[in-house]
Image (cartoon, rainbow, N blue to C red):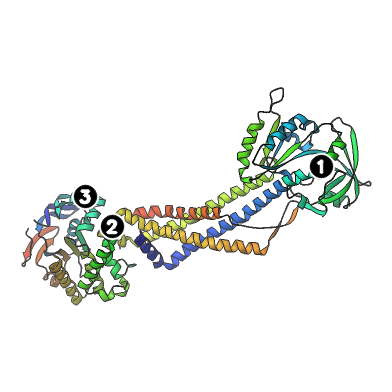
C-alpha cells in the first residue's frame, strides 16, 4: 500500500484580490521506504507540496492520503498529533532549538510530543546520536557546532520518533557541497537502516542525482518522474 | 512539567539583561509595596493601639443618644442605676470580654488658686480602667498612676499651662444635673502625656469623687469602655453584643443602650481608612508594573521566537504545551521578582527598625516607628505578583500556541 496518495491536489493562495494557484491538480503515489526528491526552480511549488504532505497546510482541492490517513479533515490538534507520530522534518536552516543541547534537541520529540519513558527515550536518542556520528558532541549547544553537524542533528531529531516519513525542504541549501553530500548520504543510510521514506526538495542538480525517484515540478504542475530504481509510482 | 520549566528557565537566561531588568523592575515594585504596607500598617496599628489601649477601649456602651451629644458630656443622658446593673450583668457573661470599665464623664473648672481653666474629666474605678485601657498608666509622665479618692491625674498641657506640679493641691468645680455648683479639692498625683483623639486631654479622678462633686445618689454611669480578649473579633462581637443589648427597652419601647466600636468614636478611623485606600492603590500600581513588564517581555519573546514556535509546532508539539511553555516563562519571572523583592523588602524593613525612626502625630511626639512584616501580607503580595505574571503571559502565550506552523516557519 502506498505511503502517500495524492489525487488531483490544488493549492490556491490569496494575495490581495488576486488568487494564485500554486499547485495545479497534482496526482502521484509514493511507496514506503522510498528516497524521493522533488525538483524544480524557485517558486515552482516544491515547498508548498511538502507543506501539504507534512500536514502543515491543507490543499484547496483534491485528496491527500498520508500513512493511510485523509489529512484534509484533520483539525489543528489532530494535525499536530499526526505529525508527531508519523512525520519527521528537516529544515533548510536546521531549526534546532538554541536553548537545548544536541542530545536534548534529539530527545525533544520523544519527551515533549510522545511522552516516552526515560529508559526507552535514552536508548533511542543514543542510538540516533551514534547513527549520525554526533555522540561526542551531544552536550554542545547548536551555536557550538558546524552547519553540517547541525543538519546531522536535525536528521537524528527527524528520525528519533521512528516516523513513516521524513520531509526535508532544501536540506542542503545552507551547506557546502561536501557536507551536502554527506547529509544526503546520511539520509539514505537512515532510510536503509530504519526503512523510513525520505522526501526532499532541492534545486541543486548534483544533489538531485542522489535521489532514487525524482519528481519534476514546474509552475505548480508535475512535469515528470524519473525512477532510478527505488519505490513509488505516479 | 519539569522539562517545560527547564526550557522556560533557559529561554529566560538566553536574554539575561532583559530578564534581569524585568525581574528587577518587579522586585523594586514588590519592595516599595512591602515597605509601604509595613510602615503604613505599623503606623496604623500603633495608632489604633494607642487610641484603644490608652483612652477609648475597643468599644463603648452609652445610653441611647449620648454619643450624638458627646461633645457636651450631658449628665442627663447618663445610664441610670437599673440600666447599669443590667448592662453589667450582660457584660459579665460575655467570654470574649477581657475587661470593662464604667466611667462618669463631665466638664468642670480647674483651679490652682491663682488661675482657673476648663477641664474635661473622666471618673473611673482605677483597677477596672487600667485593665480596660492598659496603656493609660503608662501615659503618666510624672508622679504616680495611683488614683485613690482625693487624687487627680491631670493632662500635660494643663499642668504646663497652669504651672501645676505633682503634689500640688487643686480645686475642681462642676455643675450637677440640677444646675447646682459644687467643688472639691484634689492633690495632683500624676501628669498625663497628651495623646491625639477623644479623651486624649482629659483628667482622671476616682469614681467616688465624681459622685461627690456631682451629688449623685444612685449609680449613674456615662459610658462603659470594653476591652476584648481578641481585637480581631471586634466586629463579630459588637454585632453579638448589639443584639443582646437591643432587647433592653425603656417603657416607651425604645432601646436603652447604644454600642459603638472605636471606629465610630475616633476620627483616626478615617485616617486608617485613607491608609487602606492608599495601600490599595499602591498595590494596583504594582499590578500595573508587573502586568506591563511581563506582557512586554513575553510579547518580545514570542516575536523573537516565531520560527522556533513554528519548528516545535511542526514537530508535533500540541498548542497547549506551547501555551504552557510561555506561561511558565512568565510565571518564573514573577517568582524571581517576588522572591527577590520580598527578601530585599524584609532587609529594608529590618534596617528601618534598626534606624529607630521617630515621628510626631498630633500631640504625640517622638513616637518610634516599629515596622514589621505580616507573613500574610508577604504571601498575598507574592501570590498577586505571580498570578498577575501568569495572566500577563497568557495573551502572548495564546498567540504563540495559535500560530500556524507554516506561517511561523516562513517568518524572517
Do tags 3 and 1 sit on the same chain? no
Q: Residue at x 11, y 61 (%)?
A: A32
**Residue wearing tag 2:** B317
Q: Secondary structure at mark 1?
A: strand
Q: Are marks 2 and 1 in contact (CB under 8 Å)?
A: no
**Residue at 65% across, 62% down:** B353
For label 3, the crowd category at 10 Å Cα-Cα, with few meaning under 14, some 14 to 19 and many 20 or more, is some
User: In the figure, is residue A32 to the left or right of B371?
Assistant: left
Instruction: Measure the alpha-carbon separation of dots 2 and 1.
Output: 79 Å
- Please report whichever mark, 2 or 1, sits nearer to the chain's N-terminal start: 1
Q: Is residue B320 left or right of residue B121?
A: left
Choose top left, top right, bottom left or bottom right for residue B263.
top right
- Which quadrant holds the N terminus of chain B? bottom left
Task: Please report, as a chain letter, where disc 1 is located.
Answer: B
Residue drawn 44% across and 67% down?
B17
Farthest residue, direction right: B114
Q: At 59% from the left edge and 63% from the top edge, which residue is drawn? A: B348
Q: Chain of mark 2?
A: B
Alpha carbon separation for disc pair 2 and 3:
15 Å
The mark found on residue B38 in the picture is none
Same chain for the residues under marks 2 and 3 in the image: no
Residue nearest the viewer, comparing A96 with A111:
A111
The number of callouts visible is 3
**According to the image, label 3 marks what residue?**
A74
Q: Residues within 10 Å of mark 2 (few under 14, many from 20)?
A: many
Q: CA distance from mark 3 to mark 1?
A: 87 Å
Query: Foreground: B61 or B347?
Result: B61
Amino acid at each position: 500500500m502506498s505511503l502517500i496518495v495524492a489525487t488531483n491536489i490544488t493549492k490556491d493562495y490569496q494575495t490581495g484580490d488576486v488568487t494564485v494557484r500554486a499547485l495545479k491538480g497534482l496526482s502521484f503515489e509514493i511507496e514506503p521506504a522510498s528516497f524521493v526528491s522533488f525538483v524544480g526552480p524557485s517558486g515552482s511549488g516544491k515547498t508548498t507540496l511538502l507543506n501539504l504532505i507534512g500536514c502543515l497546510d491543507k490543499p484547496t482541492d483534491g485528496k491527500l492520503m498520508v500513512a493511510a490517513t485523509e489529512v484534509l479533515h484533520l483539525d489543528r490538534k489532530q494535525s499536530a498529533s499526526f505529525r508527531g507520530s508519523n512525520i519527521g522534518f528537516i529544515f533548510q536552516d536546521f531549526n534546532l532549538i538554541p536553548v537545548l543541547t544536541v542530545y536534548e534537541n534529539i530527545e525533544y520529540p520523544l519527551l515533549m510530543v510522545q511522552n516516552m519513558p526515560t529508559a526507552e527515550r535514552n536508548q533511542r536518542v543514543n542510538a540516533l546520536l551514534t547513527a549520525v556520528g554526533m555522540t561526542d558532541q551531544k552536550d554542545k549547544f547548536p551555536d557550538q557546532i558546524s552547519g553540517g553537524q547541525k543538519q546531522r542533528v536535525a536528521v537524528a531529531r527527524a528520525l528519533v520518533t521512528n516516523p513513516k516519513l521524513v520531509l526535508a525542504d532544501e536540506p542542503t541549501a545552507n551547506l557546502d557541497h561536501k557536507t551536502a553530500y554527506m547529509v544526503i548520504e546520511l539520509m539514505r543510510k537512515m532510510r536503509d537502516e530504519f526503512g523510513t521514506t525520505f522526501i526532499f526538495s532541492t534545486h541543486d542538480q548534483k544533489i538531485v542525482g542522489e535521489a532514487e525517484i525524482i519528481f519534476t515540478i514546474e509552475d505548480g504542475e508535475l512535469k515528470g518522474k524519473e525512477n532510478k530504481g527505488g519505490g513509488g509510482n505516479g | 512539567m519539569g522539562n517545560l520549566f527547564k526550557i522556560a528557565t533557559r529561554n529566560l537566561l538566553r536574554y539575561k539583561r532583559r530578564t534581569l531588568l524585568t525581574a528587577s523592575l518587579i522586585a523594586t515594585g514588590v519592595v516599595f509595596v512591602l515597605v509601604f504596607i509595613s510602615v503604613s500598617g505599623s503606623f496604623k496599628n500603633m495608632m489604633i493601639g494607642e487610641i484603644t489601649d490608652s483612652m477609648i477601649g475597643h468599644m463603648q456602651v452609652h445610653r441611647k443618644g449620648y454619643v450624638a451629644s458627646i461633645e457636651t458630656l450631658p449628665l442627663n443622658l447618663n445610664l441610670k442605676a437599673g440600666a447599669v446593673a443590667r448592662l453589667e450583668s450582660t457584660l459579665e457573661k460575655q467570654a470574649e470580654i477581657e475587661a470593662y470599665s464604667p466611667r462618669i464623664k463631665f466638664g468642670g473648672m480647674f483651679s490652682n488658686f491663682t488661675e482657673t481653666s476648663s477641664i474635661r474629666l473622666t471618673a473611673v474605678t482605677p483597677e477596672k480602667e487600667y485593665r480596660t485601657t492598659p496603656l493609660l498608666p503608662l501615659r503618666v509622665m510624672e508622679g504616680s498612676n495611683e488614683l485613690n479618692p482625693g487624687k487627680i491625674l491631670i493632662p500635660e498641657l494643663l499642668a504646663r499651662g497652669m504651672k501645676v506640679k505633682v503634689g500640688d493641691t487643686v480645686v475642681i468645680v462642676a455643675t450637677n444635673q440640677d444646675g447646682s455648683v459644687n467643688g472639691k479639692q484634689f492633690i495632683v498625683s500624676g501628669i498625663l502625656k497628651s495623646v491625639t483623639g477623644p479623651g486624649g486631654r482629659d483628667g482622671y479622678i476616682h469614681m467616688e469623687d465624681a459622685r461627690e462633686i456631682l451629688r449623685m445618689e444612685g449609680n449613674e454611669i456615662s459610658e462603659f469602655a470594653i476591652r476584648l480578649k481578641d481585637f480581631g473579633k471586634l466586629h463579630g462581637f459588637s454585632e453579638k453584643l448589639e443584639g443582646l443589648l437591643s432587647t433592653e427597652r425603656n417603657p416607651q419601647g425604645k432601646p436603652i443602650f447604644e454600642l459603638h466600636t472605636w471606629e465610630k468614636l475616633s476620627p483616626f478611623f478615617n485616617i486608617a481608612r485613607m491608609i487602606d485606600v492608599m495601600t490599595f492603590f499602591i498595590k494596583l500600581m504594582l499590578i500595573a508594573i508587573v502586568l506591563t513588564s511581563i506582557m512586554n517581555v513575553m510579547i518580545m519573546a514570542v516575536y523573537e521566537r516565531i520560527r522556533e514556535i513554528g519548528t516545535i509546532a511542526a514537530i508535533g508539539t500540541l498548542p497547549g504545551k506551547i501555551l504552557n511553555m510561555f506561561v511558565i516563562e512568565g510565571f518564573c519571572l514573577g517568582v524571581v521578582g517576588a522572591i527577590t523583592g520580598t527578601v530585599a523588602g524584609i532587609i529594608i524593613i529590618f534596617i528601618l527598625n534598626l534606624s529607630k525612626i521617630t515621628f510626631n502625630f498630633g500631640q504625640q511626639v517622638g513616637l518610634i516607628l516599629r515596622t514589621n512584616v505580616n507573613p500574610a501580607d508577604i504571601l498575598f503580595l507574592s501570590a498577586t505578583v505571580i498570578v498577575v505574571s501568569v495572566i500577563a503571559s497568557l495573551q502572548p502565550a495564546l498567540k504563540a500556541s495559535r500560530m500556524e506552523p507554516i506561517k511561523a516557519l516562513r517568518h524572517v
